[in-house]
């Protein structure tokens, strides 16, 4: 009789332990899929134009720059130069130089992404720096979003008047051409994400309307 009771008790204990292990396993949060996190960061990025009155620390600025310089470049020329701006007067000058960049004056940080013509190809490939610096700009925008910041790309090149005024504000030599200025800050607003995907913009194998 005692042996039977002992067996039943052991069986009950085994069932209990098994059930607890199952519950613990199901309660544990699943590890996030890194590929989904990257994909969602791309899809949820949006242009942010209003920022909190809060500085961005140097370590975060370096992360943004590292992200920018991780972009692909034609022939690995890396034909870029980044001007980091935090001075209020400089930020105001950058905003005044571009009619669509008023938010730069109210941002704690701006990064001017410039092309270095001394590092470009000769001949027809000379303008490849535009593509390379555009890729770097997008990397910075995505990194900012991933770090919980808000940012917006304000275009400069190829509008000559903007190029001239931005170059003067930043004291750029003739060989350094500003492609754009990125305003960055801790967001004071979070605009709705725009749905931009459209099958109308896609062809397969050859162009068709």
Image: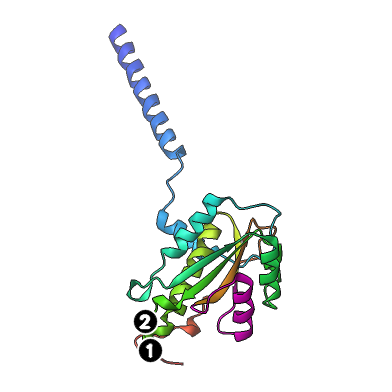
- Nearer to the camera, 182 or 120: 120
Task: State whether residue 3 is above or below residue 60.
Answer: above
Give yes or no for contact between labels 1 and 2 (Cβ–Cβ under 8 Å). Answer: yes
Alpha-carbon span between mark 1 and mark 2: 8 Å
- Nearer to the camera, 106 or 144: 106
Tell me where the magenta segment starts and ends, as one range: 154-175
On whether residue 166 falls in the magenta region, the answer is yes
Residue 6 at x, y = what percent?
Answer: 32, 12
Q: How is the image coloured?
A: rainbow
Question: Where, by quadrant of the figure, is residue 118 drawn?
Answer: bottom left
Q: Which quadrant holds the N terminus?
A: top left
Q: Name the residue under label 1.
A: 124
Other-residue count near label 2 (Cα within 10 Å), few / some / many at <14 / 14–19 / ≥20: some
- Nearer to the camera, 190 or 113: 113
Residue at x 30%, y 15% (from the top left corner): 7
Other-residue count near label 1 (Cα within 10 Å), few / some / many at <14 / 14–19 / ≥20: few
Q: Can residue 8 be seen from the camera position used here? A: yes
- How many numbered dots are placed on residues in this image? 2
Q: Residue 196 carries which label?
A: none
- Which residue ends up furthest to the top in the rendered image? 2
Q: Can residue 196 be seen from the camera position used here? A: no
Q: Name the residue under label 2.
A: 121
Residue 79 at x, y = what percent?
Answer: 42, 73
Residue 135 at x, y = what percent?
Answer: 46, 72
Task: State whether residue 46 is above or below residue 7.
Answer: below
- Secondary structure beneath label 2: loop
In this image, 43 relative to 21: left or right?
right
Residue 26 at x, y = what percent?
Answer: 43, 39
- Secondary structure beneath label 1: helix
Task: State whether residue 198 is above or below residue 70.
Answer: below
On whether residue 135 falls in the magenta region, the answer is no
Residue at x 50%, y 55% (from the top left corner): 62
């Amino acid at each position: 009789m005692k042996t039977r009771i002992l067996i039943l008790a052991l069986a009950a204990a085994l069932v209990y332990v098994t059930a607890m292990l199952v519950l613990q396993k199901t309660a544990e949060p699943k590890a996030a899929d890194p590929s989904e996190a990257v994909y969602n960061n791309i899809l949820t990025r949006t242009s942010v134009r209003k920022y909190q009155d809060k500085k961005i620390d140097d370590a975060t600025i370096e992360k943004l720059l590292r992200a920018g310089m991780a972009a692909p470049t034609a022939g690995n020329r890396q034909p870029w130069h980044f001007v980091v701006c935090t001075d209020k007067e400089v930020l105001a000058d950058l905003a005044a130089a571009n009619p669509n960049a008023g938010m730069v004056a109210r941002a704690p940080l701006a990064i001017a992404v410039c092309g270095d013509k001394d590092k470009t190809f000769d001949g027809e490939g000379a303008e490849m720096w535009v593509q390379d610096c555009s890729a770097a700009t997008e990397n910075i925008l995505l990194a900012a979003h991933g770090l919980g910041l808000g940012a917006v790309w304000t275009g400069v090149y190829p509008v000559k008047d903007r190029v001239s005024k931005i170059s003067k504000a930043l004291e750029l030599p003739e060989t350094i051409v500003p492609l754009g200025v990125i305003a960055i800050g801790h967001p004071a607003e979070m605009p709705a994400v725009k749905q931009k995907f459209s099958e109308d913009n896609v062809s397969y194998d050859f162009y068709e309307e």
